[in-house]
Image (cartoon, rainbow, N blue to C red):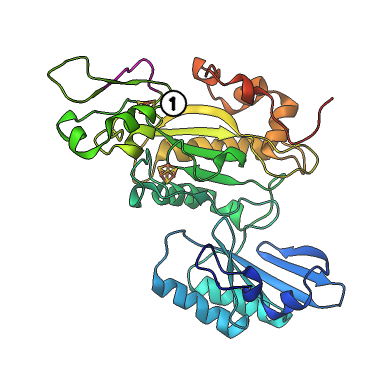
Amino acid sequence: MGKSDIGPPDFRKMLPPVIKKNYGKWKYHEIIKPGVLKHVSETGDEVWTVRAGSPRLVSVDFIRDLCDVADKYCDGHLRFTSRYNIELMTPEKENVEPLIEAVNKLGLPVGGTGKSISNIVHTQGWAHCHSAATDSSGLVKAIMDELYPYFTSMNLPARVRVALACCINMCGAVHCSDIAIVGIHTKPPKVDNSKLSAMCEIPTTMAACPTGAIRKSPDPNVKGLVVNDEKCMYCGNCFTVCPAMPLADAEGDGVAIYVGGKVSNARSAPMFSRLAIPYLPNNPPRWPEAVSAIKNIVEVYAKNARQEERMGEWIERIGWETFFKLTGIEFTEHHIDDFTHAVETYRTTTQFRW
Ligand code: SF4
Ligand code: SF4
């Protein structure tokens, strides 16, 4: 394959030798204990994997420490999963315990396999993105500190995937996780017309609004824009093209909690997560309201769901009314999807219907 500067390098170049040798020949795998997997090939080869949780924002020193562990036990190979777990893979069974010791020494927990809560996939948050309505790393740290025992054990009815997106652009793919935390703005953008004409292109900004809420100022003396508060859904599209329309608001910004999404096509079709709690305030540094709401949902699910039942499957079986009753979450008018295009999302499935 020719060399290209577009996209990531070919993954095959980076496979550990034992994986390359047995590509397409893996027969089965088992979970030996929380965080340790064993894959067996038709050729008789084995691969042992130690999975550890990691923060998403890491330093160069941290990565060097990880590479030292990989050099020592894994022939210089390591991989990050899409939920920021670190997987250290070795063909040698006797490397497993030293590997666990080495990652524990770095302060990392081993777990996140099977019926556990794996690491939380999340977006940039206040550290980086301009349209964040909540933080990512800070909130995720507060949640995982509380849910930590579910990472290092496998006592839940099924796996629970948690995701966080710090605005409704949702680059964290929260629509398909068992529990999803979404940052939301609740106030329209504040238009700064003194900067707008210098910073933004007026027609592009108006065209960026999906609900047509942005109009030219009706005041002939003001060169700029106005927002119709009634039509605004606080999506932040306008701010992306026009920095003179910031949405961030210390009082109004907060999080919504969605539940019941999954990617898996096993037993039932993949599911989109649905709204459980419309709004909880941002309360840094530990977000106690959001953390206790999520813990409550996990505990009620753990107590009531059947074995192998994912969060969404459990809710579908008992009914949403019972879900609200069991969790003590209030049902409000915000739970009713009355968006213009809602009808397209009422029923969605990857499976055929006749
Ligand atoms: S979810 Fe929104 S605010 Fe967060 S990183 Fe993505 S685009 Fe930025
Ligand atoms: S936040 Fe969204 S809906 Fe509101 S004015 Fe901007 S683009 Fe329109």
> Which SS type dominates the magenta stretch?
loop
Instruction: State the image coordinates of residue 292 (x, y, percent, origin top left).
Output: 48, 38
Instruction: State the image coordinates of residue 11 (x, y, percent, origin top left).
Output: 63, 69
Q: Which residue does the image show at 53% across and 71% down from the upper left?
A: 104
Crowding at label 1, few (<14), some or many (≥20) Cα neighbours within 10 Å?
Answer: some
Residue position for label 1: 210
Q: From the image, which quarter does the N terminus lie in?
A: bottom right
- Nearest the viewer among 103 and 181 is 181
Whether residue 188 appears in this view of the structure is yes
Where 5 falls versus 116 (above or below)? below
- Nearest the viewer among 345 and 58 is 345
Q: From the image, which quarter does the C terminus lie in?
A: top right
Amino acid under disc 1 = Pro
> In the displayed structure, does residue 62 sit left or right of residue 70?
left
Query: Over which residues does the magenta segment extend?
Result: 226-232
Q: Would you say the beta carbon of the disc 1 residue lies within 8 angstroms of ligand 2?
A: yes
In which quarter of the view is residue 88 placed?
bottom right
Instruction: State the image coordinates of residue 311 (x, y, percent, origin top left).
Output: 67, 37
